[in-house]
Each structure stands twice: as C-alpha cells, then as structure tokens.
Image: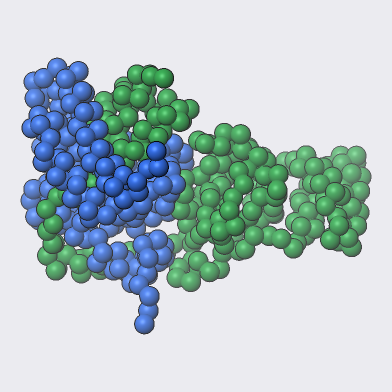
Chain colours: A blue, B green
C-alpha cells in the first residue's frame, strides 16, 4: 500500500506537474476552500471559480509556501480569502483600498517577520471552540469581525459602514479578538495544565 | 512595558488595519519580540475563522475542471526540469573544495590581469596543488587561499553583495557571478541549522528561481562554494539563499534571508 502523501510532499509533487500531488491536495482541501469561498462570495458558481483560482495560484506560488508560517491548509485558506474578497469587490466595483498590491508580487523576496516555528494544524475541537466563541460575542463585536474577515473591510471602512467612531470599532475588534484567542488558549490550558 | 503598536497586533493579523497603521506596525514588528509574540498568538484565531464556515461540497465537475487545467499547465515548458528533478538536486559540496578553488582561480586566469595578480594567482595555484595533496589537513591553507581568491574581481565577473533579511540582518554574503564560469559564493555569520536542514543558493531568473547549490555552514557560520550555471538558464537578476530541508528543494520553500541584486 502506498502511504498517502503528506501535504508538503503533495505540494512539491504538484509543482513538478505531478497530477497525483494536485489531486491529493484537491481531495483533501477543496471542501474547506469551497466552504470559505462560498461564505464570502455567497454564490455557488462564483465560489467554484474561486476554488479553481486558488488551486491555480497554489500551483504557481508553491515555491513561496513556507512551512514555518503555517500548514498548507492555512496557506490555501489565506489565498482563498484574498481571492474571494477580490471577487466581491470586483462585482461591486469597489475601489480596492488595501489590495492594490498584487498579492503574488507583494512580499516577493521580503522576509516575513511573522514567521514562526510553532504553526500546527488546529484541531476540529479548537475550530468549534472559536465558532462557539464567535456566536457568543456581543453582536456588534461579531459584526465587526465578520466585516473585517469575510468582507475584507479595514477598520475605517467598518466604522463608515456601521456609522460608528473609528476608536469604537478598533476597541471592539481588539476585544473580540482577545475573546476568541481566550477560547483557544483555554483549550490549551485544559490539555496541558500549567505547573504553578 | 506598553506601547501603542501592540494594540494593532490583533487587527493586523485579521488584516483589518488601514494602510497607515499597517505600515507603522510592519515597520515596528521586526524589532519587537513582544509584538511578534502577540501576532503569533492571534494567528490561530484567524486560521479558525477561515474554518468556521458551514461545510459545503463543490460540485463533482469542479474536480475535473481544476485537475485538467493543471495538467495542461504542467505540460508547458518550465525552467526547471520536471518530475524526478527533486532527487537530482546537487548535494552539499564536501569533497571538491580544491576543485572549487581551482575553478575560482580559472576565473582569474582567464581574464586580463596585472602581472602582480598573475604572480599571486600562480602562488595560489601552487597553494591549491599543495591542498590537493594535503586535503585532509589543509584547512588553514584553504582559509588563506580563499581569502585571496575572494578578493579577485575580473571585468567579466559581476560582484553581488547579498544582505541578511529579517531575523538575520547580520548574515552577509558576497558572490562573483560569471555567465560562463559559474558563481563563487562566500558567506559569513549564517545562523547554525539542525542536521535536517540545509541552505540553498538560487539564481533568481525572470523564469523563476533555479537551484545553484545546496550547502551547510561551517561551525563558525561561514560558507563558501562554487556552482555552475545551468546551460540555457536566463540571466539571473537576483541571487538568494533560503533555508530548506536537507538535500535541498526543487523550488524555494521559504522566504529568502539573504538577497542580492545582480547588476
């Protein structure tokens, strides 16, 4: 029996034109990518276009994938979000205030200070915790997070959309992010009790 | 300790900062371990946000659409060789130090030079012969030779200064690139790496990065190598070094931490 390719090997294989590598990655992650794309663009046919673009981009940019920065799936989801938001913006003919940099050209040869050694896949349990924490956020905090993440709005765009002061929006996003982080960290504390 | 920038970390990871704030934060981040830790702590949150959408399956037809499109693309000519090439990456150079040095000398011999330099080159060639015979204990002579060699610069050779990026600004390297003779590369202050990793030097061409050489630093963080220029490769615009798994990668898998422009 062949051992299934791990993500990194599948990615490397896909880059050399190996159809099995690409197929393995598609079968593993197309559902995740499609689900996020659909959440953002809201239209199935358009979400499928996004999926196709994501896997095309993955192929083209695989050389830029850095395992220290996150798992292959996290990287694919980052591409998915950017692509999907581009679709929505193009459809609405919105000026692209923050994505003016072509994402493929940006960061070329630039070091990423965000690089870290600790990236590992989230467990389903952790994702569910964040989902519950998101549902339990005060509605105005959740709205701000959703506008930022799923619609790609910046803080000042969110303030404009909600007709709220910018400072209020900034505080809400920070408070919400800390509560979501607490939900994850609580999980870690449960798994690995700290010695006092 | 408190500073304003730290309050930007969560929105930065969420990609919600306005351009001004983002630029301020990105300028601050490389020098601030506290903010780097803050950024790391929020990254799993954003990763989870990408995964909380209700699970939906794309249509079965999409699979063929994606895979067929890729198959067609894979058939296009590429700068790098195709399947199987990953195993063909040259291993770190260990044995032919004297060959490497001799190749560097060839660079000098083949270019017009002052008599003084020719004499110096002859001395160096003698030193190389000496090293050939005494390779096992020739380290000290080798250092002397390569210090001399590293000074050589010929009109048909382009000097490339590579600068450390990001977390390793102290790392530095110099390379002498000749289209016909190869690249001679000397680095210092490279971070130590574990045995399952290696550094890899790349010719970055308009067609993409092309492997030059996989190498590992010595105990003091130094490295020196000579690599050939693959036939038919477009002229490189940049030389770059990345950290890769031992044995190297067909394409860079990390962001370069040493970069220099070939002028």
Residue B34: image x %, image y %? 42, 29
Q: Residue pushed farthest bottom? A: A1
Residue A163: image x %, image y %? 8, 20
In terms of depth relative to the viewer, which is nearer, B52 or A14?
B52
Numbered label tally: 0
Residue B208: image x %, image y %? 46, 52
Choose top left, top right, bottom left or bottom right for residue B161.
top right
In terms of depth relative to the viewer, which is nearer, B184 or B106?
B184
Query: Which residue is at a point 17% across and 56% down the rendered structure image?
Result: A34
Instruction: For residue B50, say whether it is visible.
Output: no
Check the image and report above or below for A5 versus A134: below
Instruction: For residue B84, say whether it is visible.
Output: yes
Residue A47: image x %, image y %? 14, 53
Quadrant where the C terminus of chain A sits is top left
Query: Which residue is at a point 13% across and 57% down the rendered structure image?
Result: B55
Choose top left, top right, bottom left or bottom right for residue A168.
top left
Query: Which residue is at a point 32% across and 53% down the rendered structure image?
Result: A121
Quadrant where the N terminus of chain A sits is bottom left
Q: Horizontal placement of A54 versus B180: left or right?
A: left
Check the image and report above or below for B11 versus B159: above
Query: Which residue is at a point 74% across and 63% down the rendered structure image?
Result: B95
Check the image and report above or below for B19 versus A127: above
Q: Horizontal placement of B120 versus A25: left or right?
A: right
Q: Horizontal placement of B30 versus A143: left or right?
A: right
């Amino acid at each position: 029996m062949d051992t299934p390719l791990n993500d990194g090997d599948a990615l490397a294989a896909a880059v050399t034109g190996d159809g099995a590598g690409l197929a393995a990655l598609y079968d593993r992650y197309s559902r995740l990518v499609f689900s996020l794309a659909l959440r953002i663009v809201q239209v199935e046919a358009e979400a499928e276009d996004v999926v196709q673009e994501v896997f095309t981009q993955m192929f083209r940019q695989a050389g830029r994938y850095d395992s220290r920065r996150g798992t292959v799936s996290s990287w694919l989801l980052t591409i998915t979000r950017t692509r999907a938001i581009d679709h929505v913006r193009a459809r609405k003919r919105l000026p692209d205030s923050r994505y003016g940099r072509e994402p493929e050209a940006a960061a070329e040869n630039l070091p990423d200070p965000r690089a870290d050694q600790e990236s590992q896949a989230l467990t389903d349990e952790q994702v569910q915790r964040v989902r519950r924490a998101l549902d339990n956020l005060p509605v105005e905090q959740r709205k701000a997070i959703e506008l930022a993440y799923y619609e790609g709005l910046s803080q000042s765009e969110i303030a404009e959309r909600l007709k709220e002061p910018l400072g209020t929006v900034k505080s809400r996003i920070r408070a919400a992010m800390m509560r979501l982080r607490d939900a994850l960290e609580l999980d870690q504390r449960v798994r690995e009790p700290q010695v006092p | 300790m408190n500073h304003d920038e730290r309050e930007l970390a969560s929105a930065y990871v969420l990609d919600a900062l306005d351009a001004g704030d983002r630029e301020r934060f990105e300028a601050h981040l490389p020098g601030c371990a506290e903010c780097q830790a803050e950024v790391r702590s929020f990254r799993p949150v954003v990763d989870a946000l990408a995964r909380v959408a209700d699970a939906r399956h794309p249509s079965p037809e999409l699979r063929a659409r994606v895979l067929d499109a890729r198959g067609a693309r894979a058939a296009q000519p590429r700068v790098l060789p195709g399947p199987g090439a990953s195993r063909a990456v040259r291993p770190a150079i260990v044995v032919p130090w004297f060959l490497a040095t001799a190749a560097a000398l060839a660079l000098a011999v083949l270019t017009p030079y002052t008599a003084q330099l020719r004499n110096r080159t002859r001395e160096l060639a003698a030193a190389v012969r000496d090293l050939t015979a005494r390779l096992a204990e020739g380290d000290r002579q080798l250092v002397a030779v390569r210090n001399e060699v590293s000074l050589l610069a010929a009109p048909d050779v382009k000097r490339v200064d590579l600068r450390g990026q990001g977390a390793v600004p102290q790392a530095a390297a110099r390379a002498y690139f000749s289209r016909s003779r190869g690249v001679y590369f000397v680095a210092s202050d490279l971070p130590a790496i574990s045995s399952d990793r290696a550094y890899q030097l790349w010719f970055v061409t308009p067609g993409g990065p092309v492997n030059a050489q996989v190498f590992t630093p010595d105990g003091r963080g130094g490295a020196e190598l000579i690599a050939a220029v693959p036939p038919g490769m477009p002229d490189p615009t940049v030389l770059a070094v990345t950290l890769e798994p031992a044995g190297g990668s067909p394409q860079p898998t990390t962001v370069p931490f040493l970069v220099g422009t070939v002028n």
